[in-house]
Amino acid sequence: MIMLLSVVLFIVLLVMGLPIAYGLLTTTLFGMAFVPNVDLTAVTQRMLSGLNSFTLLAVPMFIMAANLMNMGNISQQLVNFCLAMVGHIRGGMAYANVLVSMIFAGISGSSQADTAGIGKILIPGMEEAGYDKETAVGVTVSSSTLGVIIPPSIPMVVYSSIASCSISALFMGGIVPGILIGGGQMLMIWLIGKKRGFPASEKKGLKQVAKIAVSSIPGLLTPVIILGGVLGGVMTATESACVACVYALVLGMGVFRTIKLKDLPPLLVDTLLLNSVSLFALAAANAMGQLLAYYNLSALVRVFFANYVNNYIVFMLMAILLYLFLGTFMDAIPAIILFAPILLKAAESVGITSVQLGLVITITLAIGQITPPYGVCLMLGSKIANMPIQRAFKSTLPYISVSLVVVILLAFFPQIGSIFG
């Protein structure tokens, strides 16, 4: 009965518009108050112990690296490089939008950072070039979801810390699905562009392209350093995030001189604010996880799956549907913390590895970042373009279909995520 009341309370708080982290914490305190012989200080202890992880240090570091890249004008250079490569093709600016998101994904680990950094450049730029506003927003926010699929990925870091699986395996597993989604989005651009007559930019001369390419090399090396370090076994994800921050700082202050000493305090404050939101949600989700454990929800779910969902295909479809639903009103981090441990045991019983499940969860939750009412990237993109969220969401539907196709393929053909494994 108490568990049912807790669920009702959580739903009511979400409907009222309370931030997800506060809703989780309030519901946890309510539920724990009825658990016998448990002091409410256990909630605080659980919140703190859940953050006591070396792996999770990568989260603020990747956020800071993305902020440094944006403030250091490196994002603009990546945009210029991609435009030089494909801008002259019909719909080239839209193709460049996807390409730069794929490159930036190898730096930030965050879709929001991609939307904020790249969106401020390309949404107005695409409108000025003659694209309709729907295309500018739809392509930008949809391609930004690659930020958590192509490694490094903050949700993958969080998942690896709770599933005790290899972060390198997760990172390698995200490469091919990310490329497939990016390629599928470009195919959608080509199909839509044929109907709407997308414009093409003026073709640049070979010397100009070479000049832009050379100037972009320092920025292009950032994902190589991050991924090469982790996948090569030279660095952990946390260490590579720290190296990325130092490298981006050196580029911004020493090479391009676009970051001044006076810019660092506001940059650090912005990083801390973004990080505090993520980590507070993670801490609250850990506390909620303890409440679910007291009410033995994991065992109930395992029994349900053992009795009714002992089929590989049905399990994967249910997992995808569950996380599509969760992604509409919950951030990726609490969704992973709360429900991934419950699904893991059941997944093993039907032959699904923790890495495969993690990849499916990550890609499915990436879709949630552009679906209302909680879609953070959708809200950012619509705010930049100054258009209603409903209209912005409609423009993303063709690209969402691409991600759905890829995640279903990954669910039933796990080899897609283990090509580099």
Image (cartoon, rainbow, N blue to C red):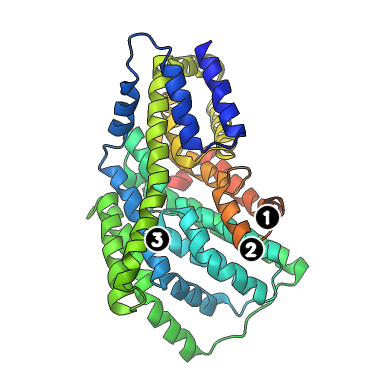
Disc on res. 210: none
Give the class, few, some or many, for how many residues have Cα within 10 Å of label 1's Cα (few <14, many ≥20): many
Q: Which residue is at 69% across, 56% downward? A: 395
- From mark 1 to mark 2, how far is it between C-alphas? 9 Å
Nearest to the observer: residue 276 or residue 4: 276
Give the class, few, some or many, for how many residues have Cα within 10 Å of label 3's Cα (few <14, many ≥20): many
- Residue type at mark 1 is Ala
| Residue identified by numbered label 2 | 385
Q: In the figure, residue 299 lies in which quadrant?
A: top left
- Foreground: disc 2 or disc 3: 2
Residues at discs 1 and 2 in contact (Cβ within 8 Å)? yes
- Residue type at mark 2 is Ala
Secondary element type, mark 3: helix
Q: Is residue 63 above or below residue 354?
A: below
| Residue identified by numbered label 1 | 392
Secondary element type, mark 1: helix
Residues at discs 1 and 3 in contact (Cβ within 8 Å)? no
User: Which tag, 1 or 3, sits closer to the chain's start?
Assistant: 3
